[in-house]
Image (cartoon, rainbow, N blue to C red):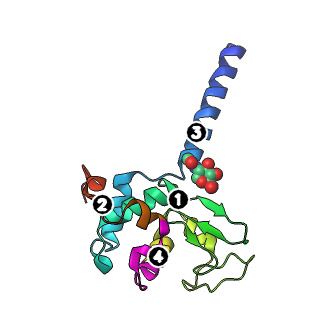
Amino acid sequence: FSPPRMTRALFISLFSCLVAINQASLISRCDLAKLLHQEDLDGFEGYSVSDWLCLAFVESHFNMSKVNEYADGSSDYGIFQINSHYWCNDYQSHSENTCHVACQELLSPNLLATIHCAKKIVSRAGGMKNWAEWSIHCAGRPLSYWVTGCHM
Ligand SMILES: *[C@@H]1O[C@H](CO)[C@@H](O)[C@H](O)[C@H]1NC(C)=O
């Protein structure tokens, strides 16, 4: 029994634990590709899994718990950065709540609520152009490399 060594071991496991917690908000590119494919997004409204991956990357860098607050009081939620002013209810600011969902549910690691809401958004006029970042960084570009190496 050696107290200093024990303390060091404790600190190392505590540190690994914190790193694990922090990374729990991230989903890997291919895990996301597989889930999007399972949820029938490949081809939905004419957009491929690559489009969705590019969208998720430019919006959140695959961070499922990302929240971004704006000066007008609304916030963007989750991997697709869905806005509380139009799509979900954050119980803080006025919301159309078109997806009929609490914004917090859009942060769930199973991604089902956020995928359901994203389908509703992309079904609107303009499709993925409803996400400004997709128009800027993904539209009209070759995107197939996003699914390279992923088994769907
Ligand atoms: C994910 O987003 C949350 C909330 O915005 C942030 O606290 C967290 O640090 C982010 N995680 C990573 C790994 O960037």
| Within-10-Å neighbours for mark 3: few <14, some 14–19, many 20+ | few
Question: Does residue 105 lie above or below 50 as drawn?
Answer: below
For mark 4, give the secondary structure. helix
The answer to whether mark 1 and mark 3 are in CB contact below 8 A is: no
Q: What is the spatial separation of the Cα atoms under label 1 and label 2, in whole angstroms?
A: 25 Å
Q: Which residue is mark 3?
A: 19
Decide if residue 25 is on the left or right side of residue 140.
right
Q: In terms of sequence position, does the residue under pointer 1 or pointer 2 come before the other?
A: 1
Question: Does residue 118 lie above or below 123 as drawn?
Answer: above
Residue under the point 41% across and 79% down: 122
Decide if residue 97 is on the left or right side of residue 47.
right
Question: Which is in the foreground here, disc 2 or disc 3?
Answer: 2
Q: Which residue is mark 2?
A: 141
Q: Which stretch did the figure color magenta?
A: 119-132
Quarter-wise, where is residue 99 in the image?
bottom right
Q: Main secondary structure of the magenta part?
A: helix
> Which mark, residue 64?
1
Task: Give the residue type that dot 4 points to.
Answer: Asn
Q: In terms of sequence position, does the residue under pointer 1 or pointer 3 come before the other?
A: 3
Q: In terms of sequence position, does the residue under pointer 1 or pointer 4 come before the other?
A: 1
For the C terminus, the quadrant is bottom left
Residue under the point 44% across and 61% down: 56
